[in-house]
Amino acid sequence: MIGRLDRTRPPIRCLVVCNGDFRGDLAYRQRALTMARHYEDLGCQTTVLWLARLSNLSGSEVKLRHHWLGIPVPPFSAGNLLICKASRSIIRLLVRIVIWLWHIELVIAESPRAAAICVRLGAPVICDFHGDLVEEMKMTASAAWQIRLSEEDERLACHESVGWMCASHTLQQVLCKRYSVSVPAVAVSCCVDIPRYADYEGKREEARANLGLNDRWVVCYVGGLAKWQEIPKTLKLVKTMRSREPQVFFLFITRDNASKYASELAAIGKEGKDYRCLSLTHDEVLEILPAADLGVLLRASSPVNLVSSPTKCGEYLASGVPVLTTAYAGDASSVIAETCAGFVLRDGATSRDDAELAISFLRISMADRASVARRSHLAAVEHYNTAHGLESIRQLLKEVLFTSLDKKLPGIG
């Protein structure tokens, strides 16, 4: 049982500041809102302030016990440098007003951009680093001025925040070395709420029956279509697997526009018979994912992938689905290698070699699928359990609140 911060005083008033289109970027949204719920579980009175780019937030999925605010704002990371600087000044004023009106004692910034806006506004700031933002922008060939602005945001976030939460230990080490700074910090992987996956076996049978996949070997990809997701390599691998073993069925789950991969999908086989492309909400994914027999999580060698903690790895495993991954998928590759809940592809292997390895794994796995599912689920319990992340956050809040707010918190010792 994770203790609350301090039962002897009123709840800490905490402002969680997020940025971006609430309807997109699902991994970011999921982590940000999960963290907000964590602060409530620890006894904070949490207000979420979502700085959405001129977006309508009605019908949002967030369910908190306290406040929810959404402020449509002009772009503060796009357009041109003058627009960004001007809009950020306006947003800083808005955030300052929110901090004053709600008597905020602690700000959690869910990105370096949000942290750069929130620092020096009268409340200590903890920055949650989801990944290496600067390297991500370089990978996506952003404009030079946008990369420089992101570097400024990250530098300010690292130097002015009173604490860090990082998606991986590697990311924490990279930031410390990059900016020669050390602050109270914890690594909090992109965890999953294990109890939500308790009935993965029952969901498997129901989902496979609904999809008509009772006798197929289901290979699944779930997630976005960003460049670092290695979608072309994933589709090529599945195509090669199907050419060697027609029993393979591909389940492609994404809320992004998959039409640009129409030709690659057609090469896999016939839609409905050999593959299905689905656009699902997160809750719907949790119902369908246990139908899979192998989850694909490929990453290329890059600074972005080196520091990552892919949410989908925990979701695959918690759903009883073993994972096929590469050595560059952040903490996922070490977890899979350690637990034998899947396998890690060899460097330099051909697509044909990878396909043969995957088919061999499936052939062995399907002979005792229930045991493989249990091993995968237990790997998630051990490495991606929300309860573990919650304890790390509790320790960080304890240290930051004690030093920054100069308040003795006897209830958390």
Image (cartoon, grey):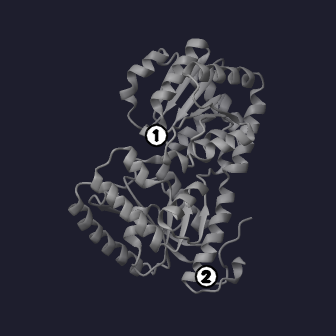
Q: Which residue is mark 2?
A: 402
**Between discs 1 and 2, the one toward the N terminus:** 1
Q: Which residue is mark 1?
A: 228
At x 38%, y 49%, the residue is 137
Question: CA gap, disc 1 to disc 2?
Answer: 39 Å
- Tell me where residue 64 appears, x and y as whole percent: 52, 62
Report the residue at 33% width, 59% height from top.
148
Q: Is residue 345 left or right of residue 153?
A: right
**Does residue 168 appear in this view?**
no
Judge by depth and name the residue closer to the eye, 49 or 212. Answer: 49
Q: Which of the numbered marks, if any, corresponds to residue 393? A: none
The answer to whether 129 is drawn above or below residue 297 in the figure is below
Q: Secondary structure at mark 1?
A: helix
Q: Position of residue 290 (x, y in %)?
A: 64, 34
Image spot of residue 329 (x, y percent): 57, 42
Residue at (46% x, 36% y) in the render: 254
Q: Position of residue 69 (x, y in %)?
A: 40, 65
Q: Amino acid at mark 1?
A: Trp
Pick the residue in front: 313 or 104: 313
Quadrant holding the N terminus: bottom right
Going by the numbered disc 2, the residue's amino acid type is Phe
Where residue 199 sits, quadrant-wise, is top right
Is the Cβ of the residue at disc 1 closer than 8 Å to that at disc 2? no
Q: Nearer the viewer, residue 403 or 394?
A: 403
Asked whether 231 or 205 is in front, the reply is 231
